[in-house]
Image (spheres, rainbow, N blue to C red):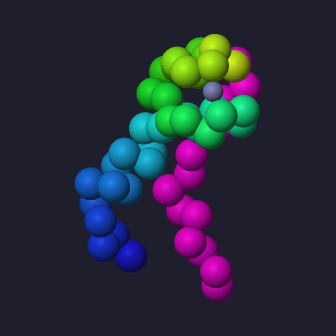
Amino acid sequence: MAKFPLAERQLLGVKVCLKCKSRNSKNALKCRKCSYTHLRNKRARRKEKA
Ligand SMILES: [Zn+2]
């Protein structure tokens, strides 16, 4: 599963802007690109297809 540990770690510490889909730090309160305040946490466990 942990094929790309580095990428996985990056995914864990990331929030994605719902508007422009740019990645922000997990501590970000708003998007650094468009200042949109609705960020969602990016989950590492996205590929659970079982
Ligand atoms: Zn944005």
Q: Nearer the viewer, residue 2 or 32?
A: 32
Where, by quadrant of the figure, is residue 39 drawn? top right
Q: Nearer the viewer, residue 21 or 48?
A: 21
Q: Position of residue 28 (x, y in %)?
A: 52, 19
Residue placed at 50% from the left, 56% from the top? Answer: 44
Type of secondary structure dominating the magenta stretch: loop
Would residue 27 be found to the left or right of residue 7 on screen? right
| Residue 46 is one of the magenta-drawn residues | yes
| Residue 38 is one of the magenta-drawn residues | yes
Is the residue 16 above or below the residue 7 in the image?
A: above
**How many numbered circles does the render carry?**
0
Q: Position of residue 38 (x, y in %)?
A: 72, 26
Residue placed at 33% from the left, 55% from the top? Answer: 7
Residue placed at 30% from the left, 73% from the top? Answer: 3
Is the residue 43 above or below the residue 5 in the image?
A: above
Q: Position of residue 5 (x, y in %)?
A: 28, 60
Looking at the rendering, in which quadrant would you find the C terminus? bottom right
Is the residue 14 above or below the residue 5 in the image?
A: above
Q: Position of residue 43 (x, y in %)?
A: 56, 51
Would residue 5 be found to the left or right of residue 19 on screen? left
Magenta-highlighted residues: 37-50
Residue placed at 64% from the left, 80% from the top? Answer: 49
Looking at the rendering, in which quadrant would you find the N terminus? bottom left
Q: Quadrant of ligand 1?
A: top right
Would residue 45 be found to the left or right of residue 7 on screen? right
